[in-house]
Amino acid sequence: MRTPVLCACLLAAAPALAAPDGDASSLQGIYGALGGGGARLVLSGDNSFGYDAEARLGYSFSPMLQLYLSAALDGGSFSGSSFKAYQLDAFVQYHFLVRPAFMVYARGGAGVGLSGDVFSTATAAGFAFAAGLGTEFRLAPNVFVAPELIYRNAQLSTSGIDQRFQVVGLQLAFVYY
């Protein structure tokens, strides 16, 4: 009984917690970010450590809500051979807490995953989705640094071969509003 009551209270308080302090007009307009980091890659049962990079471009409608396109590259080495996968997603990002120097957000998106390393003669493609949970720390009036926990998942298919590719990692991004 306590869990539903606690969830209802948190949902009711979310708009008040997210309400910006100070001048939030600088957080509206063009949104862009570049980031990268390390990740645990899982490809159809095999796993490895690797890298990730991401670029984002979109629009910030308010201090709490951003919509953008994200292009990500994840790569590593499986059984001695290198592997790279690309993912293009449309994201919605929501800030649960907006303060002048610190923000907390969650984001989710869906799109397409691509890789030329699943099968040597064709590019594998398929549905993909991604999510993230992070914080943003203000460096300058419109610039933030954002450490984030990320998750990506793509079902890659080509020539009768299906591979599930998953990424769990930490990345550091520089964000501009």
Image (cartoon, grey):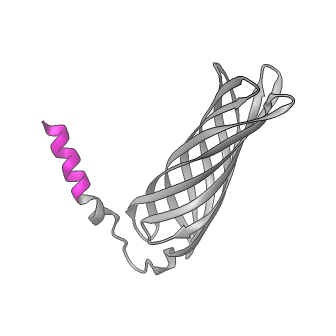
The residue shown at (67%, 25%) is: 162
Magenta stretch?
1-12
166 versus 101 height, above or below: above
Seen from the viewer's position, the closer of residues 150 and 111 is 111
Q: Identify whether 44 is placed above or below 154.
A: above
Q: Give coordinates of residue 12: x percent, y percent.
A: 22, 57
Q: Which of 33 and 121 lies nearest the eye of the viewer?
A: 121
Residue 141 x %, y %: 55, 76
**Residue 68 image-quadrant placement:** bottom right
Image point (43%, 80%), residue name = 23
What residue sits 68% from the left and 48% below the top?
Answer: 72
Residue 82 appears in the picture as rendered: yes
Quarter in which the N terminus is drawn: top left
In magenta stretch: residue 8: yes
Tell me residue 100's x, y (percent).
43, 71
Expressed as whole percent of the image width and height from the top left, the position of residue 175 reads 60, 64
Residue 42 in view in this figure: no
Residue 72 lies left or right of residue 83; in this view the side is left
